[in-house]
């Protein structure tokens, strides 16, 4: 007979919750890059400038930051039950995204507003999904959150796959919204609160202060900032880099959409594998190692520009695997070092400041490309991983290391 202690460590229904929460996150997160994936088509059909095309992605990031900051200041993630927040926010995001279908070239400002609203909604989806998953796992939490971030990664890549299958831009938008609604239904019907879920707390302005004063949370967030400096700029502009590389070689770019999907989606495997390893070897080691490899890929990118896709794509596959492999571990570190009463607020605040930083590099990379060409657009991204590695070394040497991965660090 299984002992009560083991039942607590591996509660009944844990595997179903793992699969259902991950699938829900995957489906809803297709909203993120739904407009970005069809930006080249919209540039032609709506006569967008480069700034307006970039704005379709930046608006989501800005909306996410605004929503996450408001959520953290008001402790929404700890006051509202996580599953309820996920469902309401997911439906709102699907509706805002679907509104793009009825627009034309005169509706660019409305489109940017709808993308902003989609980002605000996703600020209620992603952190609440992390909180739901953490509520089901204590042992093996790094693996579980790695699976969830892997699902986010594949979901983010999904619109590129839909586009690669031949759908027009309206089909991509409608498909992403439909998948998001399916994800909401899946979580609402098949996921309950886990045994490690924290009880909703009362609102208090002191919550954010307690988060900021926690050194373990701060160092985890510093590492996360280094990671986010690189991640979304790489995801957003990989297609443009690959297309420019093909043009420099004098080849067609029909393969770019599928390659971009693969480069982003393979990060799902990286996040899962890194989570499983981190539970056994330590979170700071895995996070720091992932950033060291991904940062090196950013530095190497000019050397492969213009070469055969058989040489360029493998480098980007390594980069895509490692650039997001560390992401879940920063979330796991926060859940392990933050007090249970403000776990949701800590997660939301971490994501808010991280996504705020992405605004710099998402906009900065194409500016560098305009000045120096796409060959030299990515090396600047290596700065973030370098600083993130330093934060992980410091966290590993701090007193908070014993709280991570069951004392492994």
Image (cartoon, helix red, strand yellow):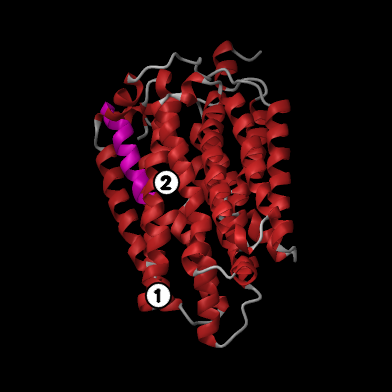
* Rendered residue at 74%/57% (across/down): 171
Q: Secondary structure at mark 2?
A: helix
Q: Quadrant of the N terminus?
A: top right
Prevailing secondary structure of the magenta residues: helix
Residue nearest the observer in this picture, 24 or 114: 114
| Residue 334 percent location from the top left of the image | 39, 32
| Residue 226 percent location from the top left of the image | 34, 50
| Residue 302 percent location from the top left of the image | 40, 75
| Residue 56 percent location from the top left of the image | 53, 57
The quarter of the picture where residue 348 lies is top left
- Residue to which mark 1 is pinned: 370
Residue nearest the observer in this picture, 152 or 105: 105
- Residue to which mark 2 is pinned: 355
* Rendered residue at 49%/46% (across/down): 274
The quarter of the picture where residue 29 lies is top right
Mark 2 crowd level (few <14, some 14–19, many ≥20, 10 Å Cα)? many
Looking at the image, the residue that sits furthest to the front is 106
In this rendering, the label closer to the viewer, 2 or 1:
1
On the picture, is 20 further left or further right than 286? right
Residue nearest the observer in this picture, 7 or 193: 193
Q: Quadrant of the C terminus?
A: top left
Let me know if residue 222 is in the magenta part: yes
Question: What span is in magenta?
Answer: 213-227
Q: Which mark is residue 17?
A: none
Count of marks, rendered view: 2
Let me know if residue 65 is in the magenta part: no
* Rendered residue at 47%/37% (across/down): 67
On the picture, is 4 further left or further right than 324? right
């Amino acid at each position: 007979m299984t002992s009560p202690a083991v039942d607590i460590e591996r509660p009944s229904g844990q595997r179903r919750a793992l699969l259902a929460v991950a699938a829900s996150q995957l489906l809803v997160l297709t909203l993120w890059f739904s407009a970005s994936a069809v930006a080249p088509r919209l540039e032609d059909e709506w006569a967008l400038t480069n700034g307006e095309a970039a704005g379709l992605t930046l608006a989501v990031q800005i909306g996410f930051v605004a929503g996450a900051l408001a959520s953290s200041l008001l402790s929404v993630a700890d006051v509202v039950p996580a599953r309820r927040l996920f469902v309401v926010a997911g439906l709102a995001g699907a509706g805002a995204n679907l509104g793009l279908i009825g627009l034309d070239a005169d509706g660019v400002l409305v489109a940017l507003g709808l993308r902003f609203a989609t980002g605000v909604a996703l600020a209620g989806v992603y952190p609440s999904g992390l909180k739901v998953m953490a509520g089901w796992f204590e042992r093996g939490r790094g693996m579980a959150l790695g699976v969830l971030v892997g699902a986010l990664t594949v979901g983010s890549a999904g619109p590129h796959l839909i586009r690669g299958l031949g759908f027009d831009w309206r089909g991509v938008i409608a498909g992403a919204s439909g998948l998001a609604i399916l994800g909401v239904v899946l979580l609402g019907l098949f996921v309950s609160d886990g045994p490690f879920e924290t009880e909703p707390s009362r609102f208090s302005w002191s919550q954010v202060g307690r988060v900021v004063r926690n050194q373990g949370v701060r160092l985890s967030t510093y590492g996360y900032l280094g990671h986010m400096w690189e991640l979304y700029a790489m995801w957003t502009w990989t297609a443009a880099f690959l297309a420019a590389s093909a043009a420099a070689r004098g080849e067609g770019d029909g393969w770019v959409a599928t390659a971009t999907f693969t480069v982003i989606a393979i990060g799902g495997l990286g996040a899962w594998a890194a989570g499983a390893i981190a539970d056994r070897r330590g979170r700071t080691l895995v996070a720091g190692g992932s950033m060291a490899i991904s940062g090196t890929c950013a530095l190497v990118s000019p050397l492969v520009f213009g070469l055969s896709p058989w040489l360029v794509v493998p480098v980007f596959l390594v980069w895509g695997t490692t650039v997001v492999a560390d992401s879940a571990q920063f979330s796991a570190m926060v859940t392990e070092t933050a007090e249970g009463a403000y776990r949701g607020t800590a997660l939301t605040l971490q994501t808010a400041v991280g996504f705020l930083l992405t605004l710099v590099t998402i906009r900065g990379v194409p500016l560098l490309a305009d000045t120096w060409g796409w060959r030299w657009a990515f090396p600047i991204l290596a700065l973030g991983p370098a600083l993130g590695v330093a934060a992980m070394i410091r966290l590993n040497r701090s007193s908070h290391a014993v709280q991570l991965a069951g004392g492994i660090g």
